[in-house]
Amino acid sequence: MSEPKTPPAPAAGGRASTKKELPEHFKAYKHVWVFIEQERGQVHPVSWELMGAGRKLADKLGVELAAVVVGAEGETVRGAVAESFCYGADLAYVVADPVLTDYRNEAYTAAMTDLVNTYKPEILLLGATTLGRDLAGAVATTLLTGLTADSTELDVDADGSLAATRPTFGGSLLCTIYTLNYRPQMATVRPRVMPMPIRVEKPIGRVIEHKLGVVEADIVTKILNFIPDRDSNKANLAYADVVVAGGMGLGSPENFQLVRNLAVAMGAEYGCSRPLVQKGWVTSDRQIGQTGKTIRPRLYIAAGISGAIQHRVGVEGADLIVAINTDKNAPIFDFAHVGIVTDAIRLLPALTEAFAKRLSAHSSDKLAS
Ligand SMILES: Cc1cc2nc3c(=O)[nH]c(=O)nc-3n(C[C@H](O)[C@H](O)[C@H](O)COP(=O)(O)OP(=O)(O)OC[C@H]3O[C@@H](n4cnc5c(N)ncnc54)[C@H](O)[C@@H]3O)c2cc1C
């Protein structure tokens, strides 16, 4: 008879031997920071969404929440600082310098890394916007720390580590990522993933001004001219109140016009599932879901969309989801608030007509009164 086998010892350096033991010199890192993204006079709303998430983390850790505002001295920076207190900041770090007038990776990375090395935050959050993604990657690599991109949940676990959760394996699994041995723990979050916190009028609190350690001559990139994107005036799908979207169930690009018509009648934005973008029926800026936009409208109407997990994660924050699908077993009915089992190609024109009549009657009532 053979000896019973004992289970093999976990491999050295493998997962089982991973310890959440922070090196001594990182133990001084405290507090939660949120990078307040502002460009051309506008603060990106994702910054306030992150302040809401940051406030919860800071309260759980019993530390302060700081806003980090970087830019040229002036109204925008001062406004961003003032607003950050209304969205929950205990203090604000400001680096104001003409070199920071327009976003340039080298200058902003220098400002951020110098701030981090001087004041040592334990958590640093940025928006997963074009600017935020560019900056976060450069800051994390310069500081040699970890970054969890496109996080969908942020929490603090029992030992005080940041637990940043994000989809993996094509969105079929969620994984929680820790930055065990480095500081700060960095994460980016896409616009609309976190709810917008309530703004509470508050006076400006503590502000720590920090000098920029680089001068214009140190920066290789020069801004010669600013040419706005010709689509920059387009309404913003992520922040729309009402969104109508179509999927493969519509069958053809011509039928997708039915979605646009309903959106026009309702004064809504329109969007789509990913295969429609891949087929070239709709432009990529209209894609909703894990690899598209995250939306949080008051009303979301999905026509001919099955409700795959990668689509679901982009729409779950909607207050009311109405799904139109011929298949009563479609996964979208698992999370829709109102389900209509019917042919969208027949229902969409009827809805468009009904909304057009109803809303025009309503607006002429208003004009008459
Ligand atoms: C890494 C990765 C990332 C992804 N990211 C995204 C993403 O960001 N966004 C996204 O949407 N998808 C994404 N996907 C794709 C996703 O997995 C699904 O394939 C996709 O969402 C399906 O699109 P659909 O619902 O339009 O099409 P289908 O799954 O083909 O569903 C069509 C639906 O229409 C219904 N239907 C058919 N005829 C009609 C009719 N006449 N009237 C009404 N209903 C009808 C059918 O019953 C069916 O439920 C991603 C996939 C991967 C692997």
Image (spheres, rainbow, N blue to C red):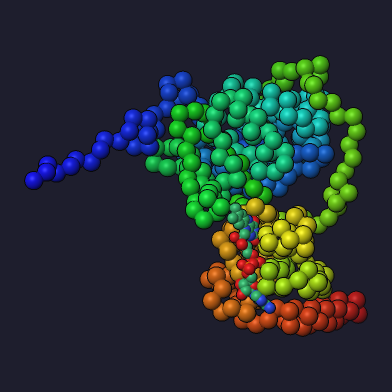
Quarter location, residue 243: bottom right
**172 shown above or below 39:** below
Q: Nearer the viewer, residue 308 or 3?
A: 3
Image quadrant assignment for residue 83: top right
Q: Residue at x 78, y 57 (%)?
A: 283
Ligand 1 is in which quadrant of the figure?
Answer: bottom right
User: Residue 359: x percent and y percent?
Assistant: 82, 77
Q: In screen coordinates, is 188 left or right of 219?
A: left
Towards the viewer: 121 or 310: 310
At x 75% / y 42%, what residue is drawn?
A: 43
Residue 225 falls left or right of residue 183 = right
Residue 90 appearing in the image: no
Residue 58: % across, % down: 52, 40
Q: At x 78% / y 73%, what residue is drawn?
A: 255
In the image shown, does 211 or 124 lie closer to the viewer? 124
Q: For the point 62% across and 24% down, which residue is it? A: 142
